[in-house]
Image (tube, helix red, strand yellow):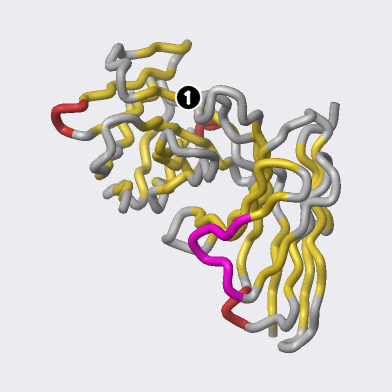
């Protein structure tokens, strides 16, 4: 079975600080996808990034960056120069490359509060 | 393009009542699914469908039924609501081509309370 652990339940930072959200996963499969989703206070789930298990390149998108390390089974997410609009719950998730079930195993989420 | 539309947004039921949560998508996605979100537990898969006429169980299917008569719609039925089904329910859809390549698109959720 798969497991995703987000050990940080809640993080509070002041605007313009950098913040890293940790994600550690467990799976016996060698091929899988990792995701990050954002859930703002309005409640919807917003897709941020997908990474497959063969691609360990770090990715940067504006103020967001992701560090995927297979050796430590981690897929951490960093927000640079945080803004109030970044306040949300962030979920890390894992999906196996299976026959169609496409079940996402979610972590329990990290609530990020960015204070002005 | 509305994406994934869920109705209602909020619902209160009494124990034993039945109801259907509606989900519709206009992106011609083959794959649709239902998740429930409970505090501190992330989201868990209830049922999913890889195309019209095909459904299967997820991680927590008990107490829920689904059907997929069209590509666009994937309703979730609670036959006899229980307080343990109090949760926020999310519908999600995606293309199945290149399994896993297409990220899930989520609806805005339905907050259900069972008293």
Task: Indicate the secondary structure of the residue bearing disc 1.
Answer: strand
Query: Is residue A74 found left or right of B94 in the rendered image?
Result: left
**The magenta stretch spans which residues?**
B56-62
In x, y percent, where is residue B11? 79, 69
Residue occupying the point 64% across, 53% down: B34
- Give yes or no for residue A110 being in the magenta stretch: no
Return the x and y of residue B59 as percentages of the image width and height: 49, 61
The reply, left or right, for residue B86 in relation to residue A50 is: right
Q: Residue at x 59, y 55 (%)?
A: B35
Query: Whole-percent x and y of residue B4?
Result: 76, 39
Q: Chief secondary structure of the magenta span?
A: loop
Q: Quadrant of residue B83?
A: bottom right
* Residue closest to the eye, A109 or A49: A49
Mark 1 nearby-residue class (10 Å; few <14, some 14–19, many ≥20):
some
Residue located beneath label 1 in the image: A49
Label 1 chain ID: A
| Rendering quarter of residue B9 | bottom right
Q: Residue at x 73, y 32 (%)?
A: B29
Is residue B82 left or right of A30 when viewed as pictured? right
- Expressed as whole percent of the image width and height from the top left, the position of residue B22 reads 82, 56
Q: Which residue lies at the image location 35% right of the left edge and 28% below the top edge?
A: A77
Res B27 seen here = yes
Which residue is the extreme one toward the left? Answer: A71
A54 relative to B104, above or below: above
**So how many labels did they put on this image?**
1
Instruction: State whether residue A42 appears in this view.
Output: no
Q: Nearer the viewer, residue B79 or A58?
A: B79
């Amino acid at each position: 079975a798969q497991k995703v652990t987000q050990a940080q339940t809640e993080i509070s930072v002041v605007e313009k600080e950098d913040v890293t959200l940790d994600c550690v996963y467990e799976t016996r499969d060698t091929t899988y996808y990792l995701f990050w989703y954002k859930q703002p206070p309005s409640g919807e789930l917003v897709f941020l990034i997908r990474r497959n298990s063969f691609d360990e390149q770090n990715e940067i998108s504006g103020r967001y960056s992701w560090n995927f390390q297979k050796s430590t089974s981690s897929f951490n997410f960093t927000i640079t120069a945080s803004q109030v609009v970044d306040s949300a719950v962030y979920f890390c998730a894992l999906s196996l490359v299976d026959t169609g079930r496409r079940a996402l195993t979610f972590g329990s989420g990290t609530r990020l509060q960015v204070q002005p | 393009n509305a994406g994934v539309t869920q109705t209602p947004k909020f619902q209160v039921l009494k124990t034993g009542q039945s109801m259907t949560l509606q989900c519709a998508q206009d992106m011609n996605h083959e794959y649709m699914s239902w998740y429930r979100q409970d505090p501190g537990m992330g989201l868990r898969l209830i049922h999913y469908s890889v195309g019209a006429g095909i459904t299967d169980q997820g991680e927590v299917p008990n107490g829920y039924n689904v059907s997929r008569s069209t590509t666009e719609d994937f309703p979730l039925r609670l036959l006899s609501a229980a307080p343990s089904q109090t949760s926020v329910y999310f519908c999600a859809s995606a293309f199945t081509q290149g399994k896993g390549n297409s990220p899930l698109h989520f609806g805005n959720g339905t907050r259900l309370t069972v008293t």
